[in-house]
Image: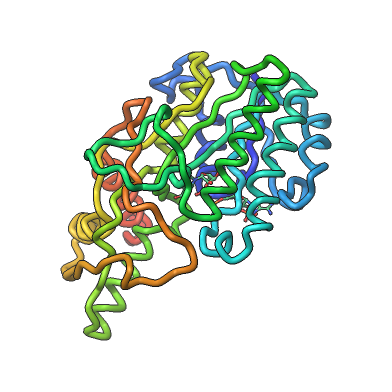
């Protein structure tokens, strides 16, 4: 199975490249995995602003599966420039869906918990059957991308060739994510004796990008990559408690002060309840976090000899 990955230099994209490139024995979910080639599509070849790019690359590489991880993920940028968000997260997705249909390729579209309004109050995670209702331009643009892809595949009677995988609160290499920002903020707080304030009324499912990537590879290998699926690490936590766990696991002695999200003004409005019910059982978020933080310690350790 020839696989192409868009946004291959992004957080999820690089994890996908790794997951699809791993030797067969490394995949518990798919020990005899059937992938042959990985095409990585990034700028300048693949640009979300160039609606002809997808068709060009699909014709060039003829992948059997495309995993679309590229997106404009700057939620505040999307709020300030909703037209650009639509072009990059909706129109480019529609163009990719059409290119896939033209070549008979499967499409795995990565989407987000931000298609929901986050007002769910029964303590359960959102399922694919729950009513969508984005609160912000990023969620709007991603949901419209889902719908455009679904309409295109349905019209062509290829419904089963499309998978929409929603996830939440991604973190992982190369960093510049919530854990690395909290560690940097804690260091700053300790130096300046300023309190480390973190929002406590946003609850979500922190998800380690390599875990998600392996799950996607497993779904494809097992013929289950179809329809709408939610994939997140197990458990739910507030941003503030996530920060506390990051500091605890990293051995950093710094207090976290709870604040309300309204005290943290930003262009976009994040959903308060960002919890998804996972259709693929993944390990608890705090266990995955420990693996991630261990890589920091290894990187910081002096070389042996
Ligand atoms: N991050 C989260 O918390 C989160 C949560 C739920 C869902 N998601 C979804 O998961 C997917 C992967 O997200 P991520 O966290 O890996 O995001 P990311 O690290 O920001 O990566 C996004 C990728 O998209 C590419 N990209 C951005 N603008 C582009 C453009 N104009 N043309 C071509 N490529 C462009 C980037 O390319 P460069 O490397 O060249 O910049 C990057 O490779 C996205 O679909 C996102 O909507 C993310």
Residue nearer the viewer, 121 or 243: 121
Q: In the visual, does 32 lie left or right of 206?
A: right
Quadrant of residue 153 in the image?
Answer: top right
Q: Quadrant of residue 197?
A: bottom left
x and y, in percent, of residue 156 in the image: 73, 18
Task: Give the residue displayed 43% in from the left and 25% down from the top.
Answer: 26
Task: Measuring from the top left, give residue 6's x and y in whole percent.
Answer: 65, 40
Number of disc labels: 0
Q: Residue at x 20, y 59 (%)?
A: 244
Q: Residue at x 58, y 59 (%)?
A: 78
In the rendered structure, the answer to whether residue 242 lies left or right of residue 53 reads left
Q: Within the image, what quadrant is residue 127 found in?
A: top left
**Foreground: 173 or 121?**
121
Q: Which residue is more in the foreground, 131 or 11?
A: 131
Does any portion of residue 18 appear in the rendered image?
yes
Q: Is residue 305 visible?
A: no
Q: Report the quarter where the N terminus lies.
A: top right
The vertical placement of 76 against 46, above or below, is: below
Q: Residue at the bottom extreme?
A: 192
Position in image of residue 5 (x %, y %): 63, 36
Check the image and tell me how it is coloured: rainbow
Up-down relation of residue 111 to residue 97 (above or below): below
The quarter of the rendered structure image containing the C terminus is bottom left
Give the residue displayed 70% in from the left and 51% down from the top.
87
Q: Nearer the viewer, residue 235 or 186?
A: 235
On the image, the x and y values in percent for residue 207 come to 37, 43
């Amino acid at each position: 199975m020839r696989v192409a990955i868009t946004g291959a230099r992004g957080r999820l994209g690089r994890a996908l490249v790794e997951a699809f490139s791993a030797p067969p024995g490394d995949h518990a979910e798919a020990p005899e995995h059937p992938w042959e080639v990985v095409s990585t599509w990034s700028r300048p070849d693949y640009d979300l602003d160039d609606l002809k790019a997808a068709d060009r690359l699909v014709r060039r590489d003829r992948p059997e599966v495309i995993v679309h991880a590229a997106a404009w993920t700057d939620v505040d940028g999307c709020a300030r420039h909703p037209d650009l968000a639509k072009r990059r997260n909706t129109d480019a997705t529609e163009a990719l869906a059409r290119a896939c249909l033209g070549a008979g390729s499967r499409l795995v579209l990565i989407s987000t918990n931000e298609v929901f309004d986050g007002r769910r109050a029964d303590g359960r995670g959102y399922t694919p059957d729950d009513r969508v209702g984005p609160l912000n331009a990023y969620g709007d643009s991603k949901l419209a991308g889902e719908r455009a892809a679904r309409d295109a595949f349905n019209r062509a009677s290829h419904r089963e060739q499309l998978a929409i995988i929603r996830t939440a609160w991604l973190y992982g290499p190369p960093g510049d994510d919530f854990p690395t920002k909290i560690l940097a903020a804690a260091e700053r707080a300790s130096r300046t004796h300023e309190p480390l304030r973190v929002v406590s009324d946003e609850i979500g499912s922190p998800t380690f990008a390599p875990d998600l990537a392996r799950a996607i590879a497993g779904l494809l290998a097992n013929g289950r990559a179809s329809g709408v699926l939610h994939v997140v690490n197990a458990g739910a936590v507030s941003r503030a408690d996530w920060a506390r766990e990051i500091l605890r696991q990293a051995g950093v002695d710094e207090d976290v002060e709870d604040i309300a999200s309204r005290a943290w003004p930003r262009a976009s409005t994040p959903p308060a309840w960002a919890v998804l019910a996972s259709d693929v059982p993944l390990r608890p978020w705090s266990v995955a976090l420990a693996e991630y933080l261990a890589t920091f310690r290894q990187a910081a350790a002096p070389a042996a000899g």
